[in-house]
Image (tube, rainbow, N blue to C red):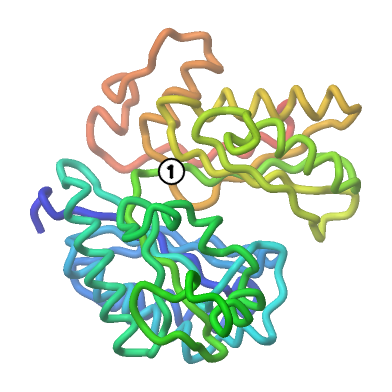
Amino acid sequence: MTNAKLVECVPNVSEGRRRDVIERLSDAAASVAGARLVDVHSDADHHRSVFTIVGGSDAVEESVLRLAAVAIEHIDLRQHRGVHPRIGALDVVPFVPLAATPMSVCVQLAHRFGRRLAEAFAIPVYFYGEAALLPERRRLADIRRGQFEGLTESLAHDPGRAPDVGPNTFGPSGATAVGARQPLIAFNIWLRTSDLAVGEAIARVVRASSGGLPGVQALAFTSSRPGMIQVSLNLTDLAATPLHVVVAKVHEEARCRGVEPAESELVGLAPASAVLGTAAAALGLPSLETRQVLELAAEIPSVIPSLQPTDLPI
């Protein structure tokens, strides 16, 4: 593997409850030499799992194709119910450049993978983000409009919803959005209220599409946790809006409405620069460099167990 082709892929699969299926998906993703499955995050409320795979572009492509085969075999969107929007069993496949890899490599990879997926499994594929072929398909939310059920109806009557590759009809595995993008952070914040309207109001305040923070996407969801709702965030421009700024804004808006924040959750992985920037802000440091973190500076595995800040104030 060379740095010129080092990539990450973060396939989102519409299964977050059946442990046996999640394990089969993980095994498939991890079965390709040169591709490393470095994280699996599953959520029963969202009924969704997020897999993080890194490695050489060819190996990562093959890894995701094997994962796709398992998802398509075992997931029926006609029976699927979760709070997260979705259009397919293999719902979203973003390719992300790492190190010195140019975005053009991930755009080409997305297009090649999308064609292979459509041909192998008769799946309608939509290209989004930097891989979009149409300007109106750059935003993932626009492709997922109406979700699986709405897309079924749209494909029959609206030529504008035709996929970029693949058939105009689909079966129980639905369709897939395949894209190329820069690294993002997926982050959830729980609030101590059962009033979803509070979360929806906060999501409107912080998300960019409603005039909020640049590069922030936000939705509010109900939760199986008693007396809790969730504000779910995607941070797509970490230079414009750092993680700690978004968290502080959500906390501020919640408390203005008489609601206390609870714990937060990182979905998948975050870039080191974002984590260090957040730590620097919390500590009042002008900056925090990798050379100042023992394990990163020495390039050794961490010898410090993960902290469990259950007794720390939010």
The amino acid sitting under disc 1 is Leu
Which quarter of the figure has residue 47? bottom right
48 is higher (above) or lower (below) than 278? below
Quarter of the image containing the N terminus?
Answer: bottom left
In this rendering, would 291 be left or right of 254?
A: left
Quarter of the image containing the C terminus?
Answer: top right
In this rendering, would 37 be left or right of 75?
A: left
Q: Residue at x 16, y 47 (%)?
A: 101
Of residue 99 and residue 305, the one placed in the foreground of this image is 99
49 is higher (above) or lower (below) than 19? above
Q: Residue at x 63, y 81 (%)?
A: 153
Q: Position of residue 7 (x, y in %)?
A: 24, 55
Q: Residue at x 48, y 78 (%)?
A: 175
Residue designated by label 1: 184
Q: How many marks?
A: 1
188 is higher (above) or lower (below) than 71? above
In this rendering, would 118 be left or right of 124?
A: left
Q: Is any atom of residue 159 visible in this view?
A: yes
Q: Position of residue 144 (x, y in %)?
A: 56, 64
Which quarter of the figure has residue 54? bottom left
Q: Residues within 10 Å of mark 1 (few under 14, many from 20)?
A: some
Of residue 274 and residue 313, the one placed in the foreground of this image is 274
Q: Position of residue 21 (x, y in %)?
A: 54, 83
Q: Residue at x 71, y 37 (%)?
A: 204
107 is higher (above) or lower (below) than 279? below
Label 1 residue SS: loop
Q: Position of residue 164 (x, y in %)?
A: 36, 72
Q: Is any atom of residue 90 visible in this view?
A: no
Of residue 38 and residue 244, the one placed in the foreground of this image is 244
